[in-house]
Image (cartoon, helix red, strand yellow):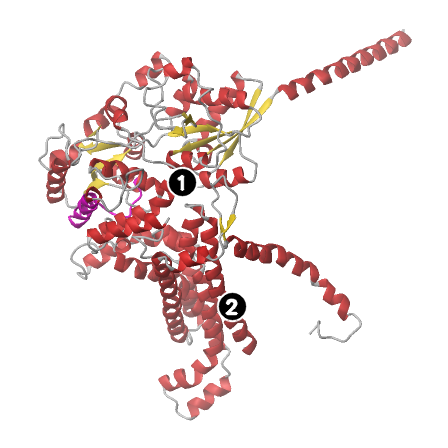
Amino acid sequence: MIAGSRSPAGPWLDAMVLPTVGMLAIVVGYPIVYALVLSTENYNLLSAESARFVGDANYRKLFADPIFWQALRNTALYAFGSVAISALLGLTLALLTEHLLGRRGRLARALLLTPWAVPFVVIAFLFRYMYLQNGGAINAVLLAAGAIDAPVSWLNVSSLALPAVMLTNIWAMTPFFFLLLSAALAGVPNEVIESARIDRAGTFGMIFRIKLPFLRNALLVSSLLMIIANFNDFAKIWAMTQGGPGYSTTTLVVYVYRQAFENFAFGYASAIGVIWLLLLLAFAVAYLRALRRN
Amino acid sequence: MIESKRIGRSLFRAAASALALALIPASATLAADKVTITFANWAAAEGTTKPSIEQVIADFEKSHPDIQIKSEAISFSEIARQLALRVKAGNPPDVAQLAGNDTFVVAATGKLEPLTSYIGADLKVKLKPDALAGLQYQGQLIALPWTLAPAGFWYNKAVMAKAGLDPEKPPRTIEELTVAMAAIKKSQPDVIPLGLDTTNRPFSLQSNWPWMETFGATPIGPKGRADSSEMKRYLAWMRDLAKAGYIDPGRKIGEFRPLAAQDKIAFTWDQVLLQGVIQGANKMPDAEFYKHWGVTTQPAGPSRKSYSFEGGHQLVMFADSKQKKAAWEFMQYLAASADAIKTYTLGPGASIPPLSAAPSADLAAKLDTPVYKSFSANIVPTVSTPPFGPAFASASSGIMAGVQQAVTGTEPIDQIAASIQQQLERQ
């Protein structure tokens, strides 16, 4: 609006954004450009030799690296899987608590939001200990209920580790969707609800034909936001499994960390970072478009 | 009378001012003569060791009034990364505390001061013969041993007795160990028979290296291969341990210690500090502890040899230090002075001093325990140094991921070994 304004103050106000643009260029632009440059170099922090230009060698190595592809697959599963289930659970909880009023309603909402208030690292350690094969609460409950015959090593079986970490993530993320969708539900116009009632819409008809269309934009924006957040989620995975066992929970962010800060291979880590950035950029564009449509 | 008093006061003021002016350059010279050493360490970053390292530094400054120590607390897991970055930025400390592969990772930057010319015959003769053996990089001594902390095979005599085993006869071979673990699992299903750290981090590879070696496996190094028959045998053994429920994968070494204090661990692969952790947790008196726990060398595998890893701490000096003489003075004090050993090494540091003989009768008495004696006489000589360096750090993730796949997965061992080897070749 301001940029397009024809008032005499327009050009002066345009100049006002320059410090912000300059700051963004330094804190965002420079690291991106530098990462792009590093991704074309053989640069190891421990090497006495200076960085050497290697063209697309890091990218060729990357595309032939099976761990990279596994990390990409794990990232997609972790981000999309967690967000889809959390959104569904958040929506269900928002619909279930929609008509809960008074002190009981407030208490239920406060309890449902509690996981969101717990720091992610605390959640990760909490679940790590609950998942323990010996002395873990989850095994104790399942054994007592007769659901399992022997304790399961949830985080140490390749096929179970990623679902177990995702479950933790879902527990932590569901309140976010619950909060957002509860607010969106409160925004559904009363006239529409009343008209639907007059037309004798059933519970499912009310949810699927009336409420959900109103929640579509909120769901889309929050899901995209959470997909971006999950692509970058390092703390939970690192605290729970450090990407293991094997590479079964290694995501792109964990792989970049290992390459950059354990192997000190900054060139190769930057190449992974560039691919990761491109993927995130695609989601960011989709997010911005969704916001604009909103 | 009044006039003379005024004159006297003026004279006194003038004399005092002159004296003050005369003293200013002197005190400025003193300040200029006092050198400051920066000491990057994790001892000051951890609650258990912080008071004792601060005490050691204060004692050093008292006995060396011309040297001031500026301690920089950096966590153990971060120190190598931070030092490597600081070396690149041209801002390293004078002295740093390092351990294991991190010492060699930082040495690879080429910015550690070689200590070969510093270590005099008097200090060399005081050190244990093996103390300097694993600290050479490109033919030069690059670190001074501060504390020794090899891993020993701890055995819980009470758990062994309950399982019908002779508590005074710990397993000497892998076969005996397997028999003992089976008896323990059968008699006490809630006890973890063997505490082994199988997490994926460089320290875990260092900790598991002696177990690989006793099977004759060396996955990296000049002649090392991860797909050798010895390595496959080791991986198969690890899988058998996990399948039988003899190990609890995924726990870090520190997470076994509280369980050991509760008699929930039969055997564990840990350093001398385990005694302090157990006694700190269950308040067991010394005499009872020695009746309850013993420590010995690793049960030998197919190679028929026992191995251990050195998990102690070293001191390094940076080549860019402007105060090398003072830095060396401080390093020697930490490693070999009776005060530092008493306050830190044998205190919360819970390690073995790198010296052949205790520097005082008081310390000799402190070291005269079954645990210290077993470590010094039996375990220290089995220490073997892996091929440390940046390649070890890069390889650790691939090798330990493979160990985890063997322990927790169902893929054939041959396939896992081949996959580790392929990863090592790609690096």
Is residue A204 on the magenta stretch?
no
| Residue B239 falls left or right of residue B314 | left
In three-dimensional space, the C-alpha distance between marks 2 and 1, rounded to whole angstroms, equals 37 Å
The residue carrying mark 1 is B390
- In the picture, the disc for residue A284 is 2
Q: Which amino acid does label 2 sit on?
A: Ala
Residue B236, compared with residue B273, is above or below; it is below
Question: What element does badge 2 sit on?
Answer: helix
- The picture places residue B124, in percent across and down from the top left corner, at 39, 17
Q: In which quarter of the image is residue B5?
A: top right
Chain letter of the residue carrying label 2: A
Q: Quadrant of residue A11?
A: bottom right
**Residue B416 in the image, given as x and y percentages of width and height:** 24, 52
Q: Can residue A125 be seen in this view?
A: no
Q: In which quarter of the image is residue B157?
A: top left
Pinpoint residue B168: horizontal percent, then vertical percent: 14, 27
Residue type, mark 1 in image: Pro
The part of the chain drawn in magenta is B232-254
As rendered, which of B25 and A119 lies closer to the eye? B25
